[in-house]
Image (cartoon, helix red, strand yellow):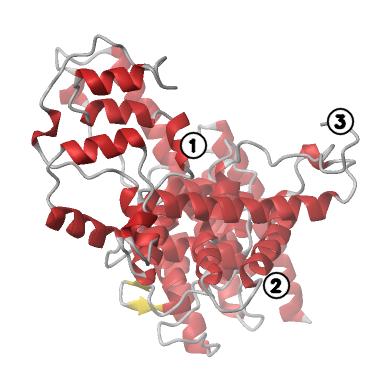
């Protein structure tokens, strides 16, 4: 075929052979809905859905490098995303139904090897095979064995029987298969039961397909999705899938852990946790009533799960004394280095949870009532801030400097979210800032000292703005 043949698609970039975990999680989260629409009565509904999700894919991840400077790059890439949905669903269906793509493909992939395992190795059969197209794959010296002692059901024959509505002659059987079937004692009832098991109802098939696809949603894919910043509807769908297949009374706890890991993915503390928290909050608004966390269902289940983890991780537990451990003969220098590394990581995590606490307070995620609405009354305002104020007030008097760092972050958020009429609170906040400032010189770690100094400076500016509003 010449290169000028119009049937040859030239310069048509292919879909990248591999996706990142975030991209795969995005695509797989929409596979069940695409598969459902392929069975619907609306013509073209599945393709329309796939093209819409392809547009979302481009908005989140952009076009691959292979499509840069390509004519009509976006429509072509959308079409290939649609083909990915279609081919993935098709492959999953074939695997669940236990049938190959075609008999030719089955033979190419080594169906003859399967035949070797079931044939009663008679010389006549060996002669037929060795003289046929499969002679390169079969050793003429293979030994005989009573492999057919147990009833054997030929694979994929059931698929042909299932599709046949007329006479049994519609079933295609190769000569080698026919000789095996004729020479074996297959129980008709066994074959009938096997055929019945392979005939799945549409709902059973759909559930199996969902299971095969949805089991791919893990805490790692959730973490990557938080980091990547996929849209709220896709993230909510992924979380709902994860909760469905990991049921518990507090199913969102692993999701919050993934959120925390996404926030702490960078080595420094420069990443603002509010972006990830806002992403989680937007996804939570789309939660159905079936998502229940600690007795709270629907959109409020997300904030409820976050509040519980914030309270749990706001308390610092110092390491127990290690004198007895160090004196042990089996204790080594590497054990001590590992202990110190673990202690440093625990302190970093404690500070990160304080930053998440502060960001959640500023976003109003601690002001959401379990009754199903956000109460803007003064009572609700005071109750939602009570825990944060107590945390900031107590942390400065603790012994470990890591608690001082955590406390100043929470205190700044408390000041930033204070009501303009809180004159008495303004004086209390000023005294707390002065106490934290005196603690600054006692901090030995330079990084923590820098963090406290920066937070103090910002808190003073926020307090000055609040003071100016009060006096105006």
Placement of the C terminus among the 4 image quadrants: bottom right
Per the image, the residue denoted by label 1 is 105
Do the residues under discs 3 and 1 have CB atoms within 8 angstroms? no
Task: Confirm whether residue 205 shows in the render.
Answer: yes
Q: What element carries label 2?
A: helix
Q: Position of residue 194 (x, y in %)?
A: 21, 55
Q: Position of residue 106 (x, y in %)?
A: 43, 36
Near mark 1 (Cα within 10 A), the count class, few <14, some 14-19 or many ≥20, is: few
Label 3 and label 1: CA atoms lie apart by: 27 Å
Q: Where is residue 421 in the image (x, y as percent from the top left)?
A: 64, 84
Q: Residue at x 59, y 41 (%)?
A: 20
Up/down of 19 relative to 429, above or below: above
Q: In this view, does 116 lie to the left or right of 224?
A: left
Q: Which of 321 and 348 is in front in this view?
A: 348
Q: Is mark 3 on a helix, strand or loop?
A: loop
Sequence-earlier tag: 2 or 3: 3
Q: Residue at x 40, y 82 (%)?
A: 370
Q: Which of 149 and 450 is in front in this view?
A: 149
Near mark 3 (Cα within 10 A), the count class, few <14, some 14-19 or many ≥20, is: few
Q: In which quarter of the image is residue 119?
A: top left
Label 2 and label 3: CA atoms lie apart by: 77 Å
Q: Residue at x 31, y 46 (%)?
A: 317
Sequence-earlier tag: 3 or 1: 3
Per the image, the residue denoted by label 2 is 466
Q: Is residue 286 left or right of residue 144?
A: right
Per the image, the residue denoted by label 3 is 2
Q: In this view, does 123 lie to the left or right of 208?
A: left
Label 1 and label 2: CA atoms lie apart by: 74 Å
Q: Quadrant of residue 331?
A: top left
């Amino acid at each position: 075929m010449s290169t000028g043949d119009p049937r040859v698609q030239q310069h048509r970039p292919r879909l990248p052979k591999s996706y990142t975990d975030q991209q795969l999680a995005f695509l797989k989260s929409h596979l069940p809905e695409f598969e459902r629409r392929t069975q619907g009565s609306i013509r073209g509904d599945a393709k329309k859905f796939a093209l819409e999700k392809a547009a979302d894919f481009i908005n989140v991840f952009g076009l691959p490098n292979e499509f840069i400077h390509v004519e009509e790059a976006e429509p072509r890439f959308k079409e290939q995303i649609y083909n990915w949905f279609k081919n993935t669903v098709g492959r999953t269906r074939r695997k669940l139904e236990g049938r190959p793509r075609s008999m030719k493909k089955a033979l190419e992939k080594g169906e003859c090897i399967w035949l070797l395992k079931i044939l009663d190795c008679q010389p006549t059969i060996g002669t037929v095979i060795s003289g046929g197209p499969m002679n390169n794959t079969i050793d003429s010296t293979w030994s005989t064995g009573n492999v057919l002692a147990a009833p054997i059901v030929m694979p994929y024959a059931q698929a042909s029987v299932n599709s046949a509505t007329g006479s049994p002659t519609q079933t295609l059987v190769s000569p080698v298969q026919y000789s095996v079937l004729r020479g074996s004692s297959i129980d008709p009832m066994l074959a009938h039961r096997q055929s019945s098991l392979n005939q799945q109802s549409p709902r059973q098939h759909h559930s199996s397909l969902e299971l095969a696809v949805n089991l791919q949603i893990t805490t790692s894919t959730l973490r990557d999705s938080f980091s990547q910043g996929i849209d709220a509807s896709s993230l909510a769908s992924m979380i709902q899938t994860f909760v469905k297949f990991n049921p518990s009374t507090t199913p969102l706890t692993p999701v919050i852990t993934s959120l925390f890991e996404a926030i702490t993915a960078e080595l420094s503390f420069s990443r603002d946790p509010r972006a990830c928290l806002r992403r989680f909050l937007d996804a939570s608004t789309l939660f159905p009533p079936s998502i229940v966390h600690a007795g709270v269902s629907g959109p409020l289940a997300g904030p409820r799960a976050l509040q519980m983890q914030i309270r749990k991780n706001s308390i610092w537990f110092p390491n127990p004394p290690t004198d007895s451990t160090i004196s042990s003969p089996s204790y080594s220098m590497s054990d001590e280095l590992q202990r110190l590394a673990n202690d440093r990581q625990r302190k970093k995590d404690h500070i990160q949870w304080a930053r998440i606490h502060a960001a959640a307070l500023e976003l109003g995620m601690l002001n959401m009532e379990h009754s199903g609405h956000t109460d803007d009354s003064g009572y609700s305002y005071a109750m939602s801030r009570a825990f944060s104020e107590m945390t900031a007030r107590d942390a400065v008097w603790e012994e470990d400097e890591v608690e001082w760092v955590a406390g100043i972050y929470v205190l700044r958020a408390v000041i930033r979210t204070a009501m303009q009429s809180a004159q008495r609170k303004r004086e209390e906040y000023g005294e707390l800032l002065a106490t934290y400032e005196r603690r600054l010189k006692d901090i030995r770690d330079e990084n923590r000292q820098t963090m406290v100094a920066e937070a103090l400076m910002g808190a003073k500016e926020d307090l000055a703005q609040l003071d100016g509003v009060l006096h105006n």
